Amino acid sequence: MANLLPIKYSASLRRAGNLIHLRFPALCITRRHCSSLKESPDEYLHRSVVPTMHFQRSLPRFPVPKLQDTMRRYLAVQKPQLDDNQFGITEKHAWDFLNGVGFKLQEEFIVQDKNNKHTSYNAELLSDKHLCQRYPLFHLNSGIAVTPDPKIEYNNQLVKATNILCSTVRFVKTLRAGLLEPDVLHRNPAKSDTERFKRFIRWVPSSLSCYVANMVEAYPLDMSQYSRMFNSTRIPKRGRDELFTDDKGRHVLVMRKGNMYVFDVVDRDGNLVKPAEIQSHLKYILSEAAPVPDFPLGVLTSEHRDVWTDLRDKLEAAGNAENLRSVDSALFCLCLDDESFRDLSDFSRNMLHGDGCNRWFDKSFSVIVTKDGQAAINFEHSWGDGKAMLRFHEEVFKDTVEQPLVHPGSAAAAVDSASAVRRLDFNLDSELKDGIKKAEENYAREVSKLSIGVLDFQDGGTEWFIRRNISPDAMVQLAFQMAFLRLYGQTCYTNEICHLLYFKHGRYDYMHTATVHTKQCSQAFVCQPGRHSVGQLKAMLHDCSTHHRQLIKEVSTGHGISSLLFALDDLATSKGQTRPGLFADPAFFAFRHRNVILSSTLSGTSLQMAMFAPGNPEGLSLPYVMHGNRIVISVGSYQCYNNQEFVQSINKSLKDIFAVLEGKTLN
């Protein structure tokens, strides 16, 4: 989630501090099965007038910011973190870098960037970052929880899983036929979000379509991540993993009690298998009496990546290559859990890692359905980010609610599911069995270190802030910093993930939300009670909001600082020369590697909450979901902090902010 980061798919793009909704696209991979005139109307979610990838060719590339502007913004990030003496040292390093080796590195980097016009440097930087990470994936994957179906009777495990599976196939077919509506940010929807404009823009050449759309304040977004969403798996390799995709796969991977099954959900003509047959196959899996295996293979995907690389090589050598290929090429993974969860913290923990045995963390994503019909998604990050998963999540949830293909009481088809469903049995020698047992021990030990808390704040949400002309996101970020100051007596490095979908292959950059404005405001609320009037505190809140909106504008338009500085640091390191003073500065190390708070904001009508692990062992993860009238915040840490205390401190901070904005005196 971390992972992160950034509109009408019901997730939000923050621009100038406002939440703007628009429809999020996916990638057209092939028209192989697009015999639409002969197919059932149930085959597609919708049929977009504008082809899915119509704007992709003309998207702008991610810019290389001016180094002078980057240094100025970098010093602004360091100012609230350092005392005067430390800041003086860091400031000297910054200007020496700008006027010396930094200028040469920037020129060299610009030349490299111009030689890679097919993509954006940010995309390659983050791809390397994710694939080279050696940490176990359960530390790195993210989870999002689906709001229960408003029709209670449809929250049945078998019914829910069948409908999700069917709607997923419909999503894939719509995507690959080029019929999924593109994502476009409409700044003037009266002109651009109309059937008339869509019929016009579809005939504009793809090489010009983005520029023409921009003329009426319509801004298409990148959709390249969707090429890796389905039939994809991250394959462990020593030093750097690889992404595998085989879009010919017609089957789904289902896991239950650590057992693994596959069956086809798309027939040979490329059409959805009859929903009643899919229901029959899932019913067969749920009723099969297979015990929990003594050596559950899925737990190996929770191992250190180099350890898993060696064990996977041994698995293939032991005659399991075909089964592994079935896992890797499956459309996605469906995890049927036998547990039920009423507590949000426990449910959050389950969607993030579960017991480790009923997961295949390497899959691009897994849909988890619990015994009581709650649903969540766990997804891997090397192929893409949270906004892509949110589009999928919103589309599929809407389809399962509005057009469910099976219903409570629906009879499963009378088919031979025992023949259609294949359980994957693996050959395991003593070395592999020892590896699985050790992986289980490592997993249990590591998972026990992660603490999770959840705050469901119900005093108000997005709509409440917008009515007062203040950025909701700015206030939640401020509440985090106030909470940390109250408990630990200092301002900390705080990153918020901001997506860069305006750009070709754009992914995300970090927005550094701890500023001199938030530091002053936090101290006024927490450390100086009674010293400021309500009017003064309210003015500080509006200053924080205004500056936060400016930060969003800078980062979302490609003028953040992390991507460029990290790229220049990597370039300097690759040259094997003495490291520039800027990058050897302890303040830069803390800036790059020791951010305490890593956060990301999401919104969606069907999104219940989100979760990812902290970005470092001494950090906090704070993903939050903004609803119109409530805010759901997840808090994760590796036992460095008391999560319950932090949840309570955030709650007090939000209540204080609400009180001041309502003109009330603080208690």
Image: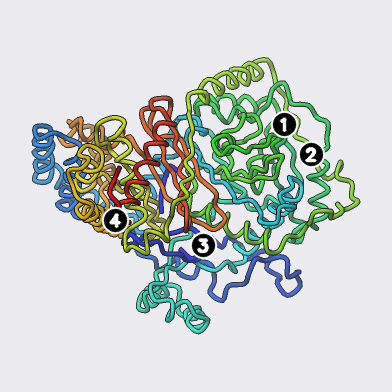
Inspect the image, locate mark 4, and give the three-letter code of the amino acid beneath it: Gly
Disc 2 target residue? 286
- Closer to the chain start, of discs 4 and 1, is 1
Within 10 Å of disc 1 (Cα), the crowding (few <14, some 14-19, many 20+) is some
Q: In which quarter of the image is residue 666?
A: top left
Disc 1, SS: loop
Tell me whether the residue at label 4 lies in contact with that at label 1, contact meaning CB atoms closer than 8 angstroms.
no
Disc 2, SS: helix
Question: Percent from the top left, x then y, of residue 575?
Answer: 23, 36
Describe residue 664's horizontal placement relative to residue 370 as left or right: left
Numbered label attached to residue 257: 1
How far apart are the two marked residues, 1 and 2, measured between alpha carbons? Answer: 10 Å
- Closer to the chain start, of discs 4 and 2, is 2
Inspect the image, locate mark 2, and give the three-letter code of the amino acid beneath it: Leu
Disc 3, SS: strand
The residue shown at (62%, 72%) is 47
Tell me whether the residue at label 4 lies in contact with that at label 2, contact meaning CB atoms closer than 8 angstroms.
no
How far apart are the two marked residues, 1 and 3, measured between alpha carbons? Answer: 34 Å
